[in-house]
Amino acid sequence: MDYLQQALSYFNTGKPQWYGWRKYNDDGTKIPNDQRMCYECLILNDNTATMPSKAEVEAKIQELKDAEAAAEAKKISGKQKLKDLGLTDAEIKALIGV
């Protein structure tokens, strides 16, 4: 999952494509494509947008990771509860597709 882009989508809502990625460093050297998608290469494409701080973006990324981990933990817990009730793995998969 691309947490950076997912996190950026929570900022400047209602302004599609408000950000982009720098292609060149300050000294004019080209930034390789595989190194451009980072906070340091973030640029504003919309002059009415506000650049979130690196701390804000990192906090949103952590929030997204925590939510994903919590969802996975709930899924594992739910499957275990169904097993504890006597359902087989095949029955659980048939019920919830996992």
Image (cartoon, helix red, strand yellow):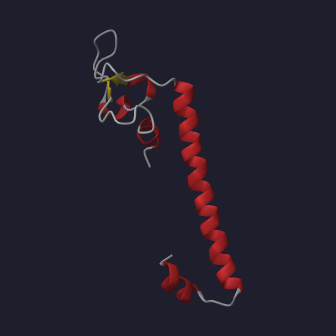
Among the 4 quarters of the image, the one containing residue 74: bottom right
Residue reaching furthest to the right = 84
**Residue at 58% over, 52% down:** 67
**Residue at 28% over, 11% down:** 28
Image position, residue 98 (x, y; %) = 51, 76
Among the 4 quarters of the image, the one containing residue 71: bottom right
**Residue at 33% over, 15% down:** 25
Residue reaching furthest to the top = 27
**Residue at 47% over, 43% down:** 3
Instruction: Left or right? Give the position of 77 relative to 48.
Output: right
Using the image as rendered, state which of residue 93 and residue 17 is in the foreground. 17
Instruction: Left or right? Give the position of 7 relative to 27.
Output: right
Image position, residue 36 (x, y; %) = 35, 29
Image position, residue 39 (x, y; %) = 45, 27
Image position, residue 51 (x, y; %) = 43, 22
Where 97 sits versus 21, above or below? below
Instruction: Left or right? Give the position of 12 relative to 62.
Output: left
Using the image as rendered, state which of residue 46 and residue 76 is in the foreground. 46
Using the image as rendered, state which of residue 40 and residue 35 is in the foreground. 40
